[in-house]
Image (tube, helix red, strand yellow):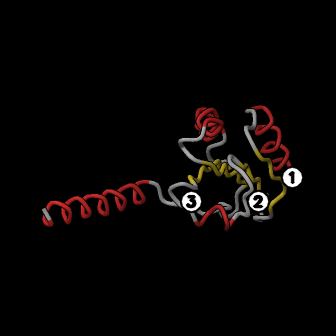
Amino acid sequence: MKHVAMCFALVIVLGAGVCFAASPVPEVPAKGMVTMVDIGAKACIPCKMMAPILEELEKEYQGKAAVLFIDVWEHRDQGAKFGLKLIPTQIFYDKEGKETYRHEGFMEKDAIREKLDKLLAQ
């Protein structure tokens, strides 16, 4: 029985390592680029609603602006690092890496585009 418990614990530990290795924390802000990072969790409902929007924007702004996602349930230290009060939170940075705007909760695609386009025009 002791052997079974040890094997089970090893599977949990190894499984957790694979999970964290699957999604590294991106560099925020992206060096020399306008950046928008959405900080949330893959399991939260508003975050799930934003996932396809982020995928579309990532393609639309490829090479012009970085559109990033950080899952705070996988990377628990990131919530404190960014001073989050709730998820999702979107943070926008200019080309110099200065935070210019922060939004809490679901954010519509057009509102994100507006912020990114304004930063790109500077």
Question: In the image, what residue occupies the spot 87% across and 52% down?
Answer: 122
Disc 1 on helix, strand or loop? loop
Q: Give me the C-alpha separation between circle 1 and circle 2.
A: 9 Å
Q: Nearer the viewer, residue 14 or 114?
A: 14
Disc 3 on helix, strand or loop? loop
Residue type, numbered disc 1 = Gln
Q: Nearer the viewer, residue 113 or 5?
A: 5
Question: In the image, what residue occupies the spot 73% across and 33% down?
Answer: 109
Lower position in the chain sequence, tag 3 or tag 2: 3
View extreme (front): residue:
1
Mark 3, other Cα within 10 Å: few <14 / some 14–19 / many ≥20: few
Q: Where's residue 66, x and y in %?
A: 65, 51
Lower position in the chain sequence, tag 1 or tag 2: 2
Q: Give me the C-alpha separation between circle 3 and circle 1.
A: 24 Å
Lower position in the chain sequence, tag 3 or tag 1: 3
Nearer the observer: mark 3 or 1; the answer is 3
Q: Which residue carries the number 1 mark?
A: 122
The label on residue 26 is 3
Q: Where's residue 103, x and y in %?
A: 80, 47
Residue type, numbered disc 2 = Lys
Question: In the image, what residue occupies the spot 84% across and 57% down?
Answer: 100
Asked if residue 21 is positioned above or below residue 39 in the image, the reply reads: below
Q: Which residue carries the number 2 mark?
A: 95
Discs 1, 2 touching: Cβ within 8 Å: yes
Q: Nearer the viewer, residue 101 or 16?
A: 16
* Residue 9 appears left or right of 70: left
